[in-house]
Image (tube, rainbow, N blue to C red):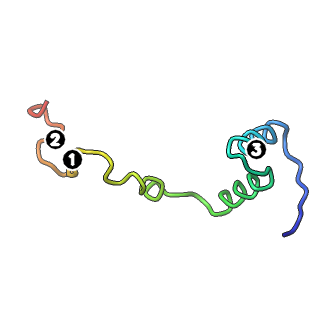
């Protein structure tokens, strides 16, 4: 691994150290995860919600069901 040096604001340092302490991991590992997540780009909602798919009950067709949202259905 390569070693780098970077200057960061005290507030960011504090956040990184708190995150490392909460996860009980080394400070360097927390920084590597944060950098990797930033460089991988935006994460779409579907991939974030995937573990929760099927967890909730209710009609699956609310967007196409006739009468949904009409005054008669209230």
Tag 1's secondary structure? loop
Residue 16 locus on image (x, y percent) = 76, 44
Give above or below for 39 relative to 26: below
Residue drawn at (46%, 59%) of the image: 47
Check if mark 2's residue and mark 3's residue have beta carbons within 8 Å.
Answer: no
Q: Going by the picture, which residue comes out furthest to the bottom?
A: 1
Check if mark 1's residue and mark 2's residue have beta carbons within 8 Å.
Answer: yes
In the figure, residue 5 lies in which quadrant?
A: bottom right
The C terminus appears in which quarter of the rendering?
Answer: top left
Q: Earlier in the sequence, mark 2 or mark 3?
A: 3
In this view, the residue in front, 41 or 32, is 32
Q: Left or right of 72: which side holds 63?
A: right
Q: Nearer the viewer, mark 2 or mark 3?
A: 3
Q: Going by the picture, which residue comes out furthest to the front?
A: 24
Q: Which residue is mark 1?
A: 62
Residue 23 locus on image (x, y percent) = 68, 46
Give above or below for 73 relative to 8: above
In this view, the residue in front, 10 or 22, is 22
Q: Left or right of 60: which side holds 32?
A: right
Tag 2's secondary structure? loop
The N terminus appears in which quarter of the rendering?
Answer: bottom right
In this view, the residue in front, 17 or 74, is 17
Q: Left or right of 64: which side holds 31?
A: right
Residue drawn at (18%, 52%) of the image: 64
Label 1, label 2: how many angstroms apart (C-alpha)?
Answer: 7 Å
Q: Left or right of 4: which side holds 53?
A: left
Q: Which residue is mark 2?
A: 68
Label 2, label 3: how many angstroms apart (C-alpha)?
Answer: 47 Å
- State the mark number for residue 16: 3
Q: Estimate how packed mark 3 is, as few (under 14), some (14 to 19) or many (20 or more) residues with alpha carbons within 10 Å.
A: some
Label 1, label 3: how many angstroms apart (C-alpha)?
Answer: 42 Å
């Amino acid at each position: 691994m390569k070693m780098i040096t970077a200057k960061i604001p005290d507030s960011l340092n504090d956040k990184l150290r708190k995150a490392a302490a909460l996860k009980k991991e080394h400070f360097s590992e927390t920084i590597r995860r944060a950098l990797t997540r930033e460089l991988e780009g935006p994460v779409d909602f579907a991939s974030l919600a995937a573990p929760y798919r099927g967890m909730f009950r209710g009609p699956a067709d609310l967007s196409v069901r006739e009468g949904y949202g009409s005054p008669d259905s209230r």
